[in-house]
Image: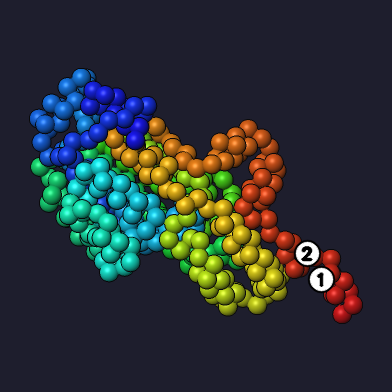
Amino acid sequence: MRLSDGNGCFRKERSSSFSAGLKLQLEVCFWFVFFPQEERLWAFCTSSPPDVPPVISDLRLCGGASSCWVVDPVEPDGCDSGFGQATARHLDIMGFRVFASVLDLQSPGAQELRRSCSSRLTLLQMDLTKTEDIQRVLQHIQAHTNSTGLWGLVNNAGFNDTIADAELSPLGKFRACMEVNFFGSLELTKGLLPLLRSAGGRIVTVSSPAGDMPFPCLAAYGASKAALSLLMDTFRSELQPWGIKVSLILPGYYKTGTTCDPAFWNLQKQQLLASLPQELLQAYGEDYVEEINQQFIQFMKVAVEDLSAVVNSITEGLLAANPAVRYYPGQGLGIMYFIHRYLPYFVRDLFLKGFFINPKLPRALRREHHNDVKKA
């Protein structure tokens, strides 16, 4: 792990072991970190100047509520699977005390965490779309960190269950993505800011390149992640006087939860087709939706199973003395962002269609359809 500079302070290039006293709490969409004993912290990092955070001696982390994702469209249930589960396990191995929030305490992912992690890990239940759950978690965190402050918060929430053009995506899908990916994260973050301000801590948020670029057929998800990224960039600027550092994680395409389950996406496709108005279905054609779904299932086959690059980026955002504003774990993101920033829009659009999904012409625009109309 590229974390310590050898003097006890966290850097990028060199690694060292952590104190056995490190602890961490994990909750459904975020990770919280706080100082239990400030004297021990400064003693552990004596070479640091006063304005550089010492090694964290007590860390709390929370993961997402309804599903997470990052250029995988759905990553379910916070720490039940995907980045949240991998990070909880990683930090537990490092010696942190982990409180992991999951949507379902009896889910296979939650049970796997119980089996694979030490007794330091505690599972908590939270649904990020329910204010009462968020308030219960906030009260829990405040009760356990009020005297120490909160060092870090990691927003790991993400949800999407629709692969379709914006016109074909029901408004309810846009609202569902915003509810989890934006409003839930906003509510929990705002609730924890007093504790974060008192500690001059960290906020690390898992967003998505789909929030920066117009990936075909990801309008609902991309719009919510764009809002989330802008919100966190605003927090970064506004919270700087308080000493809070904010980082964004923008991963490539990783295999998490149901994101790579063809049966799940085929079911979503059937539900979408059944919900479309007849006029809209006639204009686009059922085969148009089928083709999008098939291309997406093919794309899923290239999803990366090794989540370590994302986990390392999250960990560095939490613990590095000078964390980056943005992390881009995953292959191909460099060329993607170069094209996005420096080449004409039509080049970017062609690249994204070639890389992700390249929809066929809607039925009403095809030549054979016009021929059929003329004959009629």
Relative side of 186 to 358, left or right: left
Q: Is residue 21 above or below residue 77?
A: above
Measured as percent of width and height from the top left, residue 36 is found at 12, 40
Query: Is residue 272 at all visible to an observer of this figure?
Result: no
Q: Residues within 10 Å of mark 1 (few under 14, many from 20)?
A: some
Relative side of 146 to 196, left or right: left
Q: Which residue is mark 1?
A: 369
Quarter of the C terminus within the rendering: bottom right
At horizontal 20% and vertical 56% (from top left) the residue drawn is 122
At horizontal 50% and vertical 69% (from top left) the residue drawn is 264
Asked which colour scheme the image uses, the reply is: rainbow
Mark 2 vs 1: CB contact within 8 A: yes
Q: Is residue 100 above or below residue 293?
A: above
Label 1 SS = helix
Q: Which mark is residue 128?
A: none
The quadrant in which residue 317 appears is top left
Q: Which residue is mark 2?
A: 365
Quarter of the N terminus within the rendering: top left
